[in-house]
């Protein structure tokens, strides 16, 4: 089989885990599979890189003083991982040198940023790329140490060419297909396992870009599609895609098969397992995606395919997005005025904020939408100042502490009465619903509640749709 196998942050958290990942790759390689490995940064490293980069441009007296201590900690962690993941002395020496050289480059990049006092999207991408540029050689070394030829490549080296939309770059699929095929096939022909940095690509001129946070999944799927592999495996630290967050609903279980569109919907509504953009390339090429627990790889996990031919669950999963806020723009003056939504969302779009859910009452007397709680003040400020500038007198109100609950499943389409069941259940639980939305795709019904009611709402729906039953 041809496989792309991606290891996420927690499965590469330390040398011991990396060694387990390498063992899995090697055992599949020995069975005759042709494998392209994609790896994330070691767990938490990307966040740390972002944090230091931001601190370095804060206007304080001596930001550069923080660099040595930061590098010391990053070095210790990666050297230790080399030691634990790589037993072969020669490979260990070589990998440790690569890690040291990469940390030297990181030091120069950080120093540069601190002198400039400015973190552009382009330099942010450069800094964030170091997480994967440090982890990939270690995983590759660990594979080599087990006697299989392997080489670490950056996304760019593997052919992941993107546009120059730094921090959210998009792949140039035609080019990726041509270059990745050529490079990876050559390595496969030489019986070599490529280990490719997830999350990062490069413009045609070789300037480093990133695909957006959590983007290693996306890398796996872009490369999987480009290479035309048989399956894409996402190795993570949970058992698969679940019927609900097990921390919220202890009876949650793994969903065995799910369609591409349902998986996208779930990723979008905050089931953190997959990056929302990752399904598309796999879906377009009709490549099955498996979500597996890297620590228990033989446990079935979740299979994502076009049309699962199992009993049609009406609702497959209940999600809850925490830390969001609900903003309402309303007032009698809005009734019948054309372009209200356009005006409001134009302002929010210009502020660079993503809207998670929208609902409008048919009287048009108000329009409500949900944004990330971290961005609510930014949105409120943008709306107020624009309204003032344009002499608009619509009211703005805000419920800060809400959650979005979504019931997701393709079986809802054309099944009457699902909404009644959802809202009947919530009503019987004594929970007040603030706003409701259903996409015309009928893949989800979503609504907002006070965040204090959120867990209760998830659990009530999970039991109403009998999601705790084996399926
Ligand atoms: N390391 C990147 C991040 O933390 C990409 C990923 O892990 O998927 O966002
Ligand atoms: Mg992830």
Image (spheres, grey):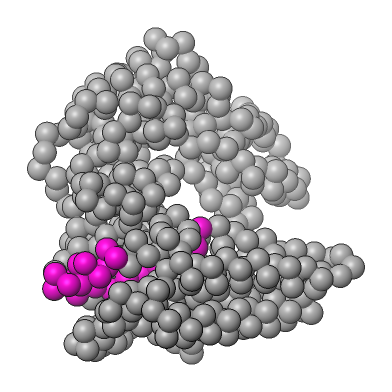
Disc tally is: 0
x and y percent of residue 391 in the render? Answer: 74, 44
| Position of 300 relative to 51 (above/below) | above
Instruction: Please name the residue shown 34% across and 51% down the image.
Output: 295
Residue 352 placement, left or right of 393: left
x and y percent of residue 58 in the render? Answer: 80, 64
Of residues 158 and 300, the one drawn nearer to the viewer in this rendering: 300
Range of magenta residues: 23-43
| Position of 250 relative to 142 (above/below) | above
Instruction: Please name the residue shown 23% across and 46% down the image.
Output: 299
Instruction: Please name the residue shown 40% across and 35% down the image.
Output: 245
x and y percent of residue 77 in the render? Answer: 57, 65
Asked if one can make out residue 74 in the rendered structure from this viewpoint, the answer is yes
Q: Residue furthest right?
A: 61
x and y percent of residue 158 in the render? Answer: 36, 82
Specify whether residue 124 is painted magenta.
no
Residue 2 placement, left or right of 172: left
Asked if one can make out residue 336 in the rendered structure from this viewpoint, the answer is no
Of residues 375 and 40, the one drawn nearer to the viewer in this rendering: 40
Quadrant housing the N terminus:
bottom left
Of residues 275 and 31, the one drawn nearer to the viewer in this rendering: 31
Quadrant housing the C terminus:
top left
Instruction: Please name the residue shown 43% across and 81% down the image.
Output: 89
- In which quadrant of the rendered view does residue 277 lie? bottom left
């Amino acid at each position: 089989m041809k496989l792309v196998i991606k290891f996420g942050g927690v499965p590469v958290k330390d040398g011991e885990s990396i060694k387990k990942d390498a063992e899995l790759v090697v055992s599949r390689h020995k069975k005759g599979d042709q494998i392209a490995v994609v790896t994330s940064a070691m767990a938490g490293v990307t966040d740390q890189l972002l944090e230091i980069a931001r601190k370095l441009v804060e206007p304080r007296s001596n930001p550069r003083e923080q660099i040595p201590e930061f590098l010391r900690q990053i070095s210790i962690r990666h050297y230790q991982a080399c030691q634990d993941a790589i037993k072969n002395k020669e490979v260990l020496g070589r990998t440790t040198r690569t890690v040291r050289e990469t940390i030297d480059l990181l030091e120069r990049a950080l120093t540069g940023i601190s002198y400039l006092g400015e973190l552009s999207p382009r330099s942010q991408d450069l800094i964030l790329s170091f997480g994967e540029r440090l982890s990939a050689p270690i995983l590759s070394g660990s594979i080599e140490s087990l006697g299989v030829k392997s080489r670490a490549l950056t996304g760019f080296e593997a052919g992941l060419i993107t546009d120059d939309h730094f921090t959210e770059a998009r792949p140039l699929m035609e080019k990726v297909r041509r270059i990745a095929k050529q490079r990876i096939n050559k390595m496969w022909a030489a019986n070599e396992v490529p280990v490719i940095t997830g999350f990062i690509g490069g413009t045609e001129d070789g300037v480093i870009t990133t695909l957006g946070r959590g983007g290693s999944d996306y890398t796996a799927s872009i490369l999987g599609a480009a290479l035309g592999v048989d399956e894409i495996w996402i190795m993570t630290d949970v058992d698969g895609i679940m019927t609900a967050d097990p921390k919220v609903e202890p009876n949650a279980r793994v969903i065995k098969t799910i369609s591409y569109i349902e998986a996208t919907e779930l990723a979008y509504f905050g089931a953190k397992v997959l990056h929302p953009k990752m399904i598309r390339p796999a879906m377009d090429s009709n490549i099955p995606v498996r979500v597996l627990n890297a620590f228990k790889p033989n446990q079935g996990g979740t299979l994502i395919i076009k049309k699962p031919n199992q009993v049609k669950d009406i609702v497959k999963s209940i999600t809850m997005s925490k830390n969001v806020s609900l903003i309402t723009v309303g007032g009698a003056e809005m009734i019948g005025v054309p372009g209200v939504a356009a005006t409001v969302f134009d302002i929010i779009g210009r502020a660079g904020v993503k809207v998670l859910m929208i609902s409008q009452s048919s009287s048009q007397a108000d329009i409500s939408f949900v944004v990330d709680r971290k961005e609510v003040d930014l949105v409120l400020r943008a709306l107020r100042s624009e309204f003032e500038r344009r002499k608009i007198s619509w009211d703005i109100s805000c419920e800060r502490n809400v959650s979005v609950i979504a019931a997701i499943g393709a079986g809802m389409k054309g099944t009457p009465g699902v909404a009644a069941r959802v809202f009947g259940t919530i009503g019987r639980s004594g929970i007040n619903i603030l706003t409701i939305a259903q996409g015309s795709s009928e893949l989800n019904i979503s609504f907002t509640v006070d965040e204090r009611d959120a867990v209760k709402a998830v659990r009530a729906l999970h039991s109403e749709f009998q999601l705790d039953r084996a399926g």
